[in-house]
């Protein structure tokens, strides 16, 4: 699928995600004005189909229809899902991807939940680290991310090391935990390369006390040197953040391009 714009923000949430209210069209209009490709990436969480506000399989036709209307006016858009992977539901997630991959331009895999708790929620992470030490939570999290990469179900992988940011005490993490997180992020980036999967450079951490991207600059550089490819996502849930992030998306895209480390997922290509 060709894209007119050279800069792509491929992580945009809309009202089809429980944590956003934005219309697809609003982003597309802004993207057109700012000369940036808009990649919609709403959450799809198979384990939470019965939760209020979560995108259900039954509602997918509604998303496809809204996208098709927007896309006919704004071709600078692509449609994907941020599909949660859970190793205990691997065959169900596989079945979902098989049934729906043709409805989307590409599918992005992700891990937000480990053993029933959301590692990307400060509240649930606090419960998690009361029961287990942070390094063990990270161990389980990375196991799930690795399984998502190796599942071959996805065309790209989102924020491979994000859980660390949600730990209530990440800034006081032990050197051992810090080293473990870096080592595993590097390993997972290299495994992604073996599977020809681009890894997201997720910019959202810049807006939080974390103050860095996922992976951070040092890890991006090390991974790029070893051949890992990346795409860029702002993880915007609000229009304001999308617009604010444009200069950063542009800057990161240029940086990756110069290193030969930019790769768009699926068959998305820049003209
Ligand atoms: Zn996410
Ligand atoms: Zn997201």
Image (spheres, rainbow, N blue to C red):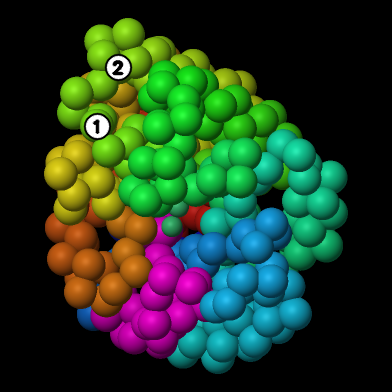
Q: Is residue 219 left or right of residue 244?
A: right
Q: Name which residue lies at 49% across and 72% down.
A: 17
Furthest-front residue in view? Answer: 130
Relative to 31, does residue 201 appear above or below in the rendering?
above
Q: Residue 110: where, in percent of width, then height? A: 55, 46
Q: Earlier in the sequence, mark 2 or mark 1?
A: 1
Asked if marks 2 and 1 touch (Cβ < 8 Å), the reply is no
Q: Name which residue lies at 56% across and 27% down.
A: 140
User: Does any portion of residue 201 appear in the rendered image?
Assistant: no
Relative to 63, does residue 226 appear above or below in the rendering?
above
Mark 2 CB lies closer than 8 A to ligand 1 = no
Q: Residue 186: where, in percent of width, then height? A: 42, 18
* Residue tagged 2: 178
**The stretch drawn in magenta includes residue 16:** yes
Q: Magenta segment, which residues?
A: 9-32
Q: Is residue 109 left or right of residue 39?
A: right
Q: CA distance from mark 2 to mark 1?
A: 12 Å
Q: Choose top left, top right, bottom left or bottom right for residue 129.
A: top left
Q: Residue 118: where, in percent of width, then height? A: 49, 48
**The stretch drawn in magenta includes residue 72:** no
Choose between 242 and 208: the one closer to the eye.
208
Q: Name the secondary structure under disc 1.
A: loop
Check the picture and name the quadrant holding the N terminus.
Answer: bottom right
Q: Name which residue lies at 62% across and 39% down.
A: 115
Q: Name which residue lies at 54% across and 63% down.
A: 43
Relative to 222, does residue 25 appear above or below in the rendering?
below
Please tell me whether mark 2 or mark 1 is closer to you in this view: 1
Choose between 228 and 40: the one closer to the eye.
40
Q: Answer few, some or many: residues within 10 Å of disc 2's Cα (few below 14, many 20 plus, some between 14 and 19).
A: some
Q: Is residue 89 left or right of residue 35?
A: right
* Residue tagged 1: 169
Q: Residue 79: where, in percent of width, then height? A: 55, 69
């Amino acid at each position: 699928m060709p894209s007119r714009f050279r800069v792509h923000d491929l992580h945009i949430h809309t009202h089809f995600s429980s944590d956003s209210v934005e219309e697809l069209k609003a982003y597309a209009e802004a993207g057109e004005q700012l000369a940036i490709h808009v990649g919609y990436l709403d959450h799809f969480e198979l384990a939470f189909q019965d939760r209020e506000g979560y995108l259900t399989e039954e509602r997918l036709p509604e998303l496809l229809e809204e996208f098709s209307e927007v896309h006919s006016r704004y071709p600078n858009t692509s449609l994907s899902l941020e599909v949660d992977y859970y190793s205990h539901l691997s065959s169900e997630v596989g079945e979902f991807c098989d049934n729906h991959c043709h409805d989307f331009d590409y599918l992005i895999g992700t891990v937000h939940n480990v053993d029933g708790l959301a590692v990307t929620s400060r509240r649930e992470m606090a419960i998690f680290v009361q029961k287990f030490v942070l390094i063990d939570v990270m161990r389980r999290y990375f196991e799930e991310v690795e399984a998502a990469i190796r599942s071959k179900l996805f065309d790209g992988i989102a924020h491979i090391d994000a859980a660390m940011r949600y730990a209530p005490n990440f800034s006081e993490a032990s050197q051992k935990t810090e080293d473990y997180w870096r080592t595993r992020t590097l390993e997972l980036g290299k495994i992604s390369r073996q599977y020809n999967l681009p890894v997201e450079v997720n910019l959202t951490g810049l807006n939080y006390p974390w103050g860095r991207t996922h992976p951070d600059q040092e890890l991006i550089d090390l991974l790029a040197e070893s051949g890992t490819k990346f795409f860029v996502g702002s993880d915007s849930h609000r229009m304001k953040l999308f617009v604010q992030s444009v200069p950063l998306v542009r800057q990161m895209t240029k940086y990756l391009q110069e290193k030969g480390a930019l790769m768009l997922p699926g068959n998305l290509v820049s003209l």
